[in-house]
Image (cartoon, helix red, strand yellow):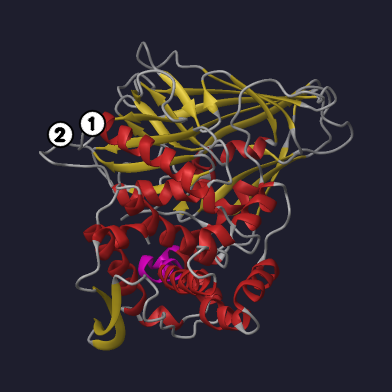
Amino acid sequence: MTCEWLAIVAAAVAANLAVGVGASQGQEEAPAFDAVFKPVRDGGSDVTAIAVTETIRGLAAGKPLVLSAPVIYAGVPGIADRVKDLAVRDDRGDVPLAVSEDAKVPGGFPYYRRWTTARPTVGAVTMSFRSLVQSPEAARGPPFGIRAVAGGVSGAGSGFLVFPEMGKADLHVRWDLSDLAAGSAGIASWGEGETRWHDTPRSLTQAWIIAGPVSRFPAAGSKNGFSAAWLGQAPFDAPAEMDWASRLYAYFGKTYRYLDPPPPYRVFMRFLTSGTGGGTALPRSFMLSALAGPPKPGAIAPHGTLAHEMTHQWVGGIAEPDGINSWFSEGLTTYFSALVPKRGGFATLDDWTREINRITQSYYAYPARTWPAAKIAEAGFGDENIRHIPYSRSALYFADIDAKIRSRSGGKRRLEDALQPIFKSREKGVRFDHAAWQAFLTKELGAGEAARWKRIVIDGELFTPGEHAFGPCFERKPATFTFDGQALDGYQWVRVAGQPDARCAAW
């Protein structure tokens, strides 16, 4: 399973990216921010850049304006370097800019280049620039960078936008598709075509975009609140696979409950002729990047990745620093996306067995299993095996405490039941951080559990889940893994003979 949910995305959830369409009410005093995105092909068949025009009206007078773009974003380098011809004008004419740059952040996490106006702006302010697409030979990484694909372009707002650092505004975004093929569409996490809502301009960076001669599921509208758009030739039956994903999304909504009804969700896919793939979730949306090719008999979409990324919709994040907080957003998502689909018949028990052993091996098979969370965060995107230790370590930990909660409640409550108050209060803006998590553990499992969590998840103490952490259908067996000739002791999970399949599927 290739997936790249990032700690930084938890901040995007907290930013309350507004996906709904419609003018805001009671915001007459707010500034107005208008943006036009124009993919350009410069006379060729492939998109070479996105030309952007942004206009702000109603800014407070007497203050300089600061514009930002990431130098690197989640392992994707050179974003600010691909911004060309940046110019700012206001009612007095051209506005000179002073350029500065944040200190580099270790691990490939974001840091920014900033352009500050050399004088306070006057009246309406217009910014224009071109953001170049990534090279087809771009280094492996999450699909944030914009890429040319099949006569169109796709990526994330963070991969091409220069945004003004300001508070909430009345946002108005539209696409200029005049340089693309007839019938092209412009779609983003926030909506399709011309869209209006109320949020910060920075919220545009926490969204996927796709523009060009897209294919769709369903052909119009959505199914179960779910829709998909893609460019390029999918190596599987994309409409059938997106139908599967729409049904899984509906099942997740019934299972996790607290988002009722589940908000609209969009899957974006780009099928490239070169480069590497990956998948990443952003608020209410997901991007799959994969190699194009004709569908082969029996080929399916990466179901595990789709389940994982859609699960992020409900798991969300915890208010802690980038890289540190992935133990929750990624670990809980890894556990739930392995556990829940089998209950609804979306994964087989064999799938479940393989996945829990994949998780187990990805923890025990690497010396970094005992690294503290801070050290792993510093390594960041430099080593994928190390970066994924919090995913697997915490997934095993969540399985362990899930089993304990079930046992203490006589089977009446599961982990997802116990988490409902946290999820609901977080949606209402209540801060959910490590202190809140430790209070939850103390309430559910007693004194000492919070300290145990810190030793395992934050400090890196080698962890052994309970013998029946994955229920009565599996038993824990010792196993040895090898890393660069080094033998590492660990465990694997083996199906218990004689347990009814129905009981195993219902766990």
Find out whether residue 386 is within the magenta segment.
yes
Residue type at mark 2: give it. Pro
User: Does the residue at mark 1 contact the one at mark 2 (Cβ under 8 Å)?
Assistant: yes
Q: Residue 185 vs residue 25: left or right?
A: left
Q: Residue 320 vs residue 254: left or right?
A: right
Crowding near pointer 2: few (<14 within 10 Å), some, many (20+)? few
Q: Residue furthest right?
A: 62
Vertically, is 462 above or below 420? below
Q: Quadrant of the rendered structure where residue 288 is?
A: top left
Q: Quadrant of the rendered structure where residue 388 is?
A: bottom left
Quadrant into which the N terminus falls = bottom left
Find out whether residue 188 is within the magenta segment.
no
Residue type at mark 1: give it. Gln
Q: Residue 477 vs residue 294: left or right?
A: right
Quadrant into which the C terminus falls = bottom left
Picture coordinates of residue 361 (x, y %)? 30, 74
| Along the line of sight, the residue nearer the viewer: 405 or 289 | 405
Picture coordinates of residue 191 (x, y %)? 53, 26
Q: How many marks?
A: 2
Q: Main secondary structure of the magenta part?
A: helix
Span highlighted in magenta in the image: 381-391
- Which residue is disc 1 drawn over? 233
Q: Residue furthest left?
A: 297
Q: Residue 241 vs residue 255: left or right?
A: left
Vertically, is 211 above or below 480? above
Residue at left 34%, top 20%? 213
- Which residue is disc 2 drawn over? 294
The residues bearing labels 1 and 2 have C-alpha atoms spaced at a distance of: 7 Å
Vertically, is 48 above or below 500? above
